[in-house]
Image: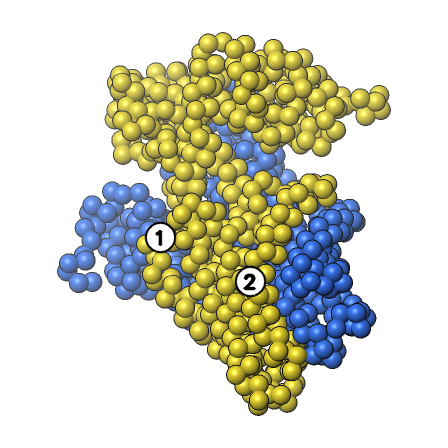
Chain colours: A blue, B yellow
Amino acid sequence: MPEETRLDVGELIRRHPAEIADILATLKEDEAVELLRRLYLRRAAAEPLGEMEPEEAARLLAELNREDAAHILSHMEPDDAVDLLAELPPETVQDILSRLGTRTARKLGDLLAYPPDTAGGLMSTEVVALPADMTAEEAIRVLRAKAEEAETVYYAYVTDEKGKLLGVLSLRDLVLARPETPLRAIMKSDAITLPVTMDVEEVARAFDKYNFLALPVVDEAGRLLGIVTIDDVLDVMRKEATEDALKLGGIPAGEDHPLDPPQVSVRKRLPWLMVLVLLNLTVAAVIRQFEGTIAEIAFVAALMPLIADMSGNAAAQALAVAIRGIAVGAVGWANLPWLMWKELRVGILAGLALGVQIGLIAALLWGRPLFGLVAGIALAGTTIGACLTGGILPFLFRRVGLDPAMMSGPVATTIGDLIGIGLFLGLATVFLPYLA
Amino acid sequence: MPEETRLDVGELIRRHPAEIADILATLKEDEAVELLRRLYLRRAAAEPLGEMEPEEAARLLAELNREDAAHILSHMEPDDAVDLLAELPPETVQDILSRLGTRTARKLGDLLAYPPDTAGGLMSTEVVALPADMTAEEAIRVLRAKAEEAETVYYAYVTDEKGKLLGVLSLRDLVLARPETPLRAIMKSDAITLPVTMDVEEVARAFDKYNFLALPVVDEAGRLLGIVTIDDVLDVMRKEATEDALKLGGIPAGEDHPLDPPQVSVRKRLPWLMVLVLLNLTVAAVIRQFEGTIAEIAFVAALMPLIADMSGNAAAQALAVAIRGIAVGAVGWANLPWLMWKELRVGILAGLALGVQIGLIAALLWGRPLFGLVAGIALAGTTIGACLTGGILPFLFRRVGLDPAMMSGPVATTIGDLIGIGLFLGLATVFLPYLA
């Protein structure tokens, strides 16, 4: 690192770990590694690494020697440490785990076994479990002693001797209770729990609904395994929202960051556009059937891009509503028949209005009322087809395990195109004697 | 309410307020109002109303008599009560406020004055402020006494006699400190604060970055006004993500819920589609200039929808990246020159690849290499235009105060269409003698 950009580490470590993480993320890789080494020497590397994106943190950590890396990991929150380990190659993970204390290594190994998109993958095992006959005063003393290592001391969990969750206490309940009260008397026994296999989207929905700061994770037997805290959920929600928005825009898995270099963006965007070209060849094939008509009445060509664009637009609207509805849990497979019927009616109503609009415009601009009628019917057909397919394809794709946000748009647009262009040129051919 | 659907209110009120809110939201309006009255008689109406969407809650509350409505509001969290009041007509708000105690009425009136999309609009004023020379033990006693009314007792705030924020304490710090320690010695004095005018998106970003459960809101003089809690931020983030996704799909302000009846959806979607028809007339006008060419070589029409669709697709990709980048704060106006240069290069790289693809396909399918060349150049032009405009328009629209997510897509698509179709038919006309 050149002398003039050398950061004052002594001053830096007094800042919030999230700010140090921001600085690490903006430095060039060799500078960031150098800074990380200096932070490590001041025992201040673990927290900022935990605040970084796991991929970036893993890239930096991989540059340190394994012994230092293991030492830093052992000081991170276990859930953050696991997110980071999940980004490293298996040999590296094994090597690092072998350098950790047995207890830490086993804990991290256990957490690594849960799929990252489940409650288990999100949870921390640093949770305080207390027996039901302990008093509030004793419980506060225990929490005080464990404050350093527990992920949150805002909730404590009451378990039986087999680890089964009996109830939940907030620190608030404890502080506000009379000191000699047994936990059994103040705990909430009908606690909301997250099954360890629950999908992260459902976890996010549970937090959104119940407004808790942390929720306990349990196995099938109801045994307490860990907790998920609301700040981890916030990260997940932001990530999922970004992924959804990008997929709706036609950008496949993996973030396309605005500041990525162009070749990275092209690698992410181009394959999808090339698939769309192929899909669109079906539309071109339909048009070729009507070359005779187009040669005779070339003015019909003027409205073909309108039909193609409208198909994409109407499909995008129905699709956005369906995808967000699925994401926030407002609708599911059971709603499909009603949604089909609804989008059909939306398509008919909007299609009629748009048909009348373009029909009048075409009749006026071209001075041919019959052409207006043909264009109007075609635009209505496009709209109906695009609404219907845009609204229901996400459910069908999801059902068969394909990504609804990516696949639905182009397929719905193509179906709308085929209906609209087919109707348009077909009707123009039928009425050719009166249009020419 | 018919006898058989009558809900057992006694059992219902033992459930979580969020679940009661769900039930209220699914009932027919008259049934929901009836249930709300019964909940009110059991003093259990305020919390479920606070958990509902403010619009729905306001609709129900408006059906009660004003005295009951005021009574329920006075038992809600002030920030929830204000969200609800903001949905009611000003006369109703005045009438309800006049029936409240002076202190509550003034508090709600003050909160109503902050724009809903700022930290002030999101905050609660139920916050515990303590003097710096109080001891930890006394502070816990104060918190215990105020637990009922304070929004959260997980943090306490230390202020001077003028209300200026001096530092922040977590309940955890208090519980873990020795009882006789003065707050001055344990408070964090460089607390992160939210200016009362800060935009909610920035508030969400601050929570995302710093992982706090609550952050204090201050005025310009640094006086403590209230706090924003993380659960409110979670609501805002979900709402903003949904709005962004819907706007990218072409659905203007106000949610289009998947289960809305079709006429409601049509009202929200149709106006936008009608604007798009008008925008597309510019493309039709360009095509009309080339009617002679199309009449002579009608096969060119087959690829016009492809160019129109590709313009929409390439624009949607660039747009989604830019909009999410702005939403999460990854890029801003200062990045514009670099982003223009980047999207130009993305457009050129992707455009060249797509041009070669369609060029080869067209040359093979139509047996005309020159037509392939023309189609390839046109598709490349469309892609470059759509990438560039899709990537930069969001910043320009945002700069002039227009909604970037709504406006950018159609304008970028139209510009891409004009470039692509213009190039396509223009080149076809130039090479007409060799193509015919």
* Residue identified by numbered label 1: B333
- For this rendering, which residue is in front, B414 or B144? B414
In the structure shown, which secondary structural element does the residue marked by tag 2 occupy? helix
* Structural crowding at the residue carrying mark 2, measured as other residues with C-alpha within 10 Å and reported as few (<14), some (14–19) or many (≥20): some
The amino acid type found where label 1 is placed reads: Trp
Task: Give the residue number, with chain letter if any, for mark 2.
Answer: B282
Tag 2 or tag 1, which sits nearer the N-term?
A: 2
Q: Secondary structure at mark 1?
A: helix
Q: Real-space Cα distance between discs 1 and 2? A: 30 Å
Q: Is residue A38 above or below residue B95?
A: below
- Residue B125 in the image: x percent, y percent? 42, 22
Q: Is residue B429 left or right of residue A16?
A: right
Q: Chain of mark 2?
A: B
> Is B225 left, or right, of A242 in this rendering?
left
User: Is there any visible trace of residue A200 in the rendered image?
Assistant: no
**Which residue corresponds to the image point at 49% horizontal and 22% vertical from the top-left?**
B78
Q: Quadrant of residue B421?
A: bottom right
